[in-house]
Image (cartoon, helix red, strand yellow):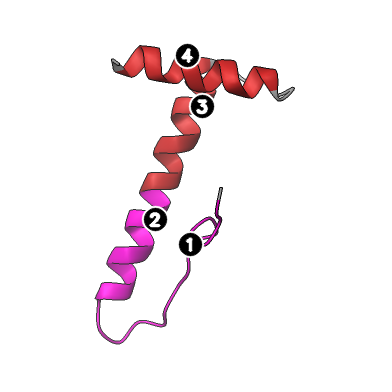
Amino acid sequence: MNNRAFWKHVLHGMEKEGYKFSLQQCKNKMNNMKKMYKDVKDHNARSGNDRKTCDHYDVSI
């Protein structure tokens, strides 16, 4: 499955659940969540910093 087909599949599943988002909105949300997770991991890897947690880290499906 290529990238565009994957996001269309995700979008179709969300529409079945009653959500109305564009393909670009779904991509942007996922990219932003990945960036936030990476930033928190990098922050916690540096010594002397207080630990941060990612908002969606412990969310289970």
- Does the magenta-highlighted stretch encompass residue 39? yes
Front label number (3 vs 4): 4
Asked whether the beta carbons under mark 3 and mark 4 sit within 8 Å of each other, the answer is no
Point out the residue furthest to the right here: 18
Element on which disc 1 rests: loop
Element on which disc 3 rests: helix
Q: Position of residue 43 (x, y in %)?
A: 32, 69
Number of callouts in the render?
A: 4
Q: Position of residue 26 (x, y in %)?
A: 51, 26
Q: Residue at x 44, y 19 (%)?
A: 7
Kind of residue at badge 3: Cys
Which numbered disc, 3 or 4, marks the residue that appears first in the sequence? 4
Residue that mark 2 sits on? 37
Q: Relative to 29, is 7 above or below?
A: above
Assign the N terminus to one quadrant of the image. top left
Q: Residues within 10 Å of mark 4 (few under 14, many from 20)?
A: some
Residue that mark 1 sits on? 54
Residue that mark 3 sits on? 26
Which numbered disc, 2 or 4, marks the residue that appears first in the sequence? 4
Q: Could you tell me how far apart the alpha carbons at marks 3 and 2 are, in whole angstroms?
A: 17 Å
Front label number (1 vs 4): 4
Asked whether the beta carbons under mark 1 and mark 4 sit within 8 Å of each other, the answer is no
In the image, which residues are magenta? Answer: 35-60
Q: Could you tell me how far apart the alpha carbons at marks 2 and 4 are, in whole angstroms?
A: 24 Å
Question: Picture quarter containing residue 6?
Answer: top left
Asked whether the beta carbons under mark 3 and mark 2 sit within 8 Å of each other, the answer is no
Asked whether the beta carbons under mark 2 and mark 1 sit within 8 Å of each other, the answer is yes
Residue that mark 4 sits on? 8
Q: Could you tell me how far apart the alpha carbons at marks 2 and 1 are, in whole angstroms?
A: 6 Å
Which numbered disc, 3 or 1, marks the residue that appears first in the sequence? 3
Front label number (2 vs 4): 4
